[in-house]
Image (tube, rainbow, N blue to C red):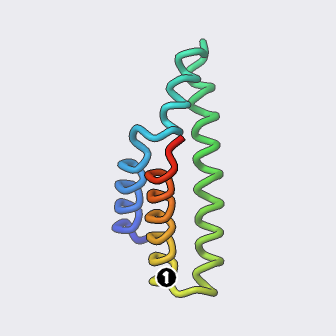
Amino acid sequence: MDFKVVLTTFGMMFLAELGDKTQLVTFAFAAESKNGFAVFLGSLGALLLSSLLAVVSGSAVSRLIPANYIKLGAGALFVLLGSWMLLFPV
């Protein structure tokens, strides 16, 4: 196992998830619930499943499209969505 990849992925995901809507929703559920551990398990399961889907999809797409094109496409999509949000605020 490549621990450098594990630690890099952990660090980037941890920083990306801090303060995002998933964390805020989990916070709200925990505040309402009398069983914080159940909220933790539900949140953990959802994050695990969504990560599994991302890894499986990313692995499949990378067989068809080179990684640098995927990175460029993802970057372009972020710029496009960010521009859309700035131009058409809700």
Depicted 38 relative to depicted 66: above or below: above
* Front residue of 6 and 60: 60
* Front residue of 58 and 78: 78
In the image, what residue occupies the spot 45% across and 78% down?
72
Location of residue 63 (image quadrant): bottom right
| Whole-percent x, y for residue 29 in the image | 58, 23
In the image, what residue occupies the spot 39% across and 68% down?
5
What residue occupies the far front of the structure in this picture?
87
Depicted 54 relative to depicted 27: above or below: below
* Front residue of 60 and 75: 75
Mark 1 surroundings within 10 Å by alpha-carbon count, few (fewer than 14), some (14 through 19), many (20 or more): few
Q: Is residue 53 left or right of residue 79?
A: right
| Whole-percent x, y for residue 88 in the image | 51, 50
What residue occupies the far top of the structure in this picture?
34
Depicted 29 relative to depicted 69: above or below: above
Q: Quadrant of the C terminus?
A: top right
Number of marks present in the image shown: 1
In the image, what residue occupies the spot 35% across and 62% down?
8
| Whole-percent x, y for residue 33 in the image | 60, 16
Name the residue tied to disc 1: 67
Q: Quadrant of the N terminus?
A: bottom left
In the image, what residue occupies the spot 49% across and 83% down?
69
| Whole-percent x, y for residue 61 in the image | 63, 78
Residue type of the residue flagged with mark 1: Ala
Helix, strand or loop at label 1? It is: helix
